[in-house]
């Protein structure tokens, strides 16, 4: 009789252990525990359960539509940057693009109203730009290792796209960039004239600071007289153009813009390269 009791206890223990391998779904239905097996041959053995050495085969495809960066007519006050950290409030937008329009690299940091930058932070090279997802941050701080520069910050949405050169032999081109503003209708220089060769402009950004409702047309002095429109939204407006085929300016000639109407202020930045 004692032996029978021991056997029954062992059987009950086995049953309890097995029942512990079941689970309940969100509706309380019992779902038996299952271990996926991989590498199984028909009527034969399996390689083993899913693990780092036996990964689960997955096939499928992913498709998405990504739109380019769209300025949202929101711009920060241009930030003057030196070897002492300074900060500026970020413009509205799910993406902010920071343009370095000067000749010194800027190191930047996102944060709150007390944020400070150091030279170990993200760097925006001279004449370059960098895009950020601001998240809950409300300010951008910046500092230089030496010298001074200016940062323009544009708020908007979408995926910023880079700009590249083309047509020049390796080692024969040099990067150029510049920024300028005007409140009139005279031609205004953005990038100074090179000593030799031509300016090839790969991207340009312009914005107006006034609240006028009449659109302003900005015209560049490239060979095609390319035009950029700034809408009359009543709250300021901007535009960002990337040229897959660079704008070409006449040899040893500055890259300039002309505003079609006099407003409080029109700012323009441009990036590109100087080559034969």
Image (cartoon, rainbow, N blue to C red):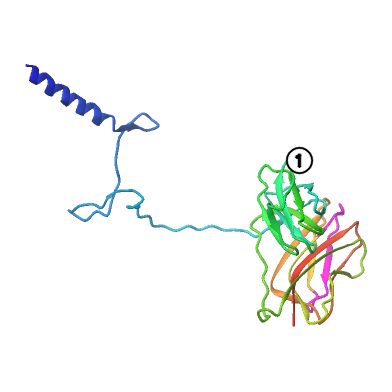
Task: Identify the image quadrant of the C terminus.
Answer: bottom right
In this view of the protein, which residue sits in the foreground, 134 or 172?
172
In the rendered image, residue 126, in percent from the top left (x then y), is placed at 75, 63
- Please tell me whether residue 186 is drawn above or below residue 26 in the rendered image: below
Q: Which residue is drawn at 37% across and 33% down?
A: 25
Q: Mark 1 points at which residue?
A: 114
Q: Magenta stretch containing residue 224, yes or no? A: yes
Q: In this view, does 161 lie to the left or right of 154?
A: left
Which residue of the protein is positioned furthest toward the top in this rendering? 1
Which residue of the protein is positioned furthest toward the front in this rendering? 146
Range covered by the magenta-colored residues: 207-225
Q: Magenta stretch containing residue 206, yes or no? A: no
In this view of the protein, which residue sits in the foreground, 52 or 146?
146
Circle 1 residues within 10 Å: few <14, some 14–19, many ≥20 = few
Q: Residue at x 66, y 45 (%)?
A: 135
Task: Identify the image quadrant of the N terminus.
Answer: top left
Where residue 161 sits, quadrant-wise, is bottom right
In the rendered image, residue 173, in percent from the top left (x then y), is placed at 71, 77
């Amino acid at each position: 009789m004692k032996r029978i009791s021991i056997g029954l206890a062992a059987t009950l223990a086995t049953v309890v252990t097995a029942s512990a391998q079941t689970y309940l779904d969100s509706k309380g239905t019992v779902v038996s525990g299952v271990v996926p097996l991989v590498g199984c041959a028909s009527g034969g053995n399996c390689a083993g359960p899913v693990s780092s050495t036996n990964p689960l085969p997955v096939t499928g495809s992913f498709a998405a539509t990504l739109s380019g960066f769209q300025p949202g007519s929101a711009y920060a006050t241009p930030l003057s940057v030196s070897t002492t950290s300074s900060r500026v409030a970020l413009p509205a937008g799910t993406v902010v693009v920071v343009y370095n329009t000067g000749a010194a690299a800027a190191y930047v940091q996102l944060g709150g109203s007390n944020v400070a930058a150091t030279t170990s932070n993200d760097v925006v090279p001279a004449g370059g730009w960098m895009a950020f997802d601001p998240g809950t941050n409300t300010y951008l701080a910046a500092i230089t290792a030496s010298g001074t520069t200016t940062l323009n910050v544009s708020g908007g949405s979408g995926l910023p796209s880079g700009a590249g050169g083309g047509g020049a032999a390796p080692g024969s081109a040099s990067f150029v960039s510049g920024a300028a503003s005007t409140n009139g209708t005279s031609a205004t220089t953005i990038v100074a004239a090179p000593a030799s060769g031509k300016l090839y402009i790969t991207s340009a950004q312009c914005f107006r600071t006034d609240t006028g409702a009449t659109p302003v047309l900005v015209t560049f002095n490239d060979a095609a007289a390319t035009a950029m429109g700034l809408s009359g939204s009543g709250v300021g407006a901007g535009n960002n153009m990337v040229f897959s085929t660079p704008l070409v300016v006449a040899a040893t000639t500055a890259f300039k813009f002309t505003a079609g109407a006099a407003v409080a202020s029109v700012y323009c930045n441009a990036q590109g390269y100087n080559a034969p």
